[in-house]
Image: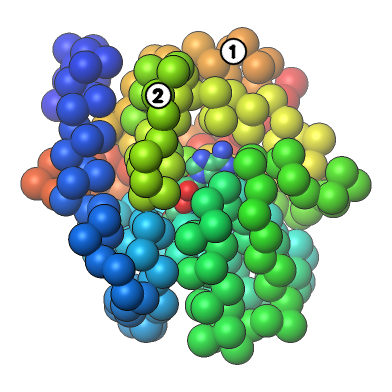
């Protein structure tokens, strides 16, 4: 799909379709799913990263600080955070704004035996973290569809798709460098379902540069999606 020709309303419609097709609203009991050759727990309301979602790709594509600390914002079921702990990170903090995602991530930390090095907590971007906490790498597989600024969330799963006015992403871009240890790296994802030109504007407004680290194209719910990982730098 040509990014330029897609309107806000069309993107929003695709976001609603993703909520309907990927959302677990019909599930009321915890379940499990498989990804990356492992089994994972899922509390209803949490984004289930099936094959084809960005999670599968990003989790194996991003650089992890070996022996260092890793913060995942918006951890969802905790796949990337657990993977980080299983692949060399000494300390992992996994956060999400929804309590259902926090509950799923806690189950997966236990299931994969990494509770000694993964701390899970609820946080709205950085707002609820210890004010002094800093990390060697920070990552967010963010919610890429812009919703109207006055959008009201009616189910936890919508948080995985929609960001009203890209306000949460704006806070991430503005604040991430204050949370890095010297030499640390700030990473964010974006994909072709979102509005790349708005994100470029947002990066300018926050005084940061987005540099492409890696990308991959896959099919998600019938839509061809190009997933991208960016490093965020501040001049
Ligand atoms: C695209 S999903 C990715 C979930 C998970 N990291 C994965 O890759 O499967 C985005 C996640 O960000 C969370 N999120 C959305 N807004 C947030 C905010 N303001 N603060 C923290 N997490 C947020 C959502 O609840 C969701 O779990």
- From the Cβ of disc 2, is ligand 1 less than 8 Å away? no
The residue indicated by pointer 2 is 151
The residue carrying pointer 1 sits among few (fewer than 14), some (14 to 19) or many (20 or more) residues within 10 Å by Cα, namely: few
The residue indicated by pointer 1 is 204
Q: Is residue 219 visible?
A: no
- Residue in the picture at 73% in, 39% down: 127
- Residue in the picture at 54% in, 30% down: 169
- From the Cβ of disc 1, is ligand 1 less than 8 Å away? no
Q: Quadrant of residue 207?
A: top right
* Helix, strand or loop status at disc 1: helix
Q: Earlier in the sequence, mark 2 or mark 1?
A: 2
Between the residue at mark 2 and the residue at mark 1, the CA separation in whole angstroms equals: 25 Å
Q: Is residue 167 left or right of residue 163?
A: right
Q: How many marks?
A: 2
Q: Is residue 22 left or right of residue 55?
A: left
- Which of the labelled discs sits on residue 99, or is there none? none
Which x, y percent locates residue 22? 23, 53
Which x, y percent locates residue 209? 60, 23
Which x, y percent locates residue 147? 37, 24
* Rendering colour mode: rainbow
Which quarter of the rendered picture does the N terminus lie within?
top left
């Amino acid at each position: 799909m040509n990014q330029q020709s897609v309107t806000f309303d069309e993107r929003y419609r695709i976001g609603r379709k993703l909520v309907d097709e990927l959302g677990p609203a019909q599930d009321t009991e915890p379940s499990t799913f498989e990804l990356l050759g492992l089994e994972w727990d899922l509390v209803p309301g949490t984004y289930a990263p099936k094959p084809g979602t960005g999670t599968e790709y990003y989790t194996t594509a991003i650089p992890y600080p070996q022996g260092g600390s890793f913060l995942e914002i918006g951890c969802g079921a905790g796949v990337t955070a657990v993977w980080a702990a299983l692949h060399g990170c000494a300390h992992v903090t996994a956060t999400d704004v929804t309590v259902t995602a926090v509950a799923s991530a806690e189950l997966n930390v236990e299931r994969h035996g990494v509770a000694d090095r993964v701390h899970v907590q609820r946080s709205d971007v950085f707002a609820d973290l210890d004010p002094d906490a800093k990390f060697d790498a920070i990552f967010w597989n963010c919610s890429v569809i812009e919703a109207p600024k006055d959008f009201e969330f009616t189910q936890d799963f919508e948080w995985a798709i929609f960001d009203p006015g890209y306000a949460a992403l704006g806070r991430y871009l503005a604040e991430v460098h204050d949370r890095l240890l010297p030499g640390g790296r700030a990473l964010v994802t974006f994909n072709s379902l979102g509005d790349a030109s708005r994100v470029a504007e947002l990066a300018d407004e926050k005084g940061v540069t987005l540099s492409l680290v890696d990308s991959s194209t896959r099919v998600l719910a019938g839509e061809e999606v190009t997933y991208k990982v960016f490093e965020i730098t501040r001049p």
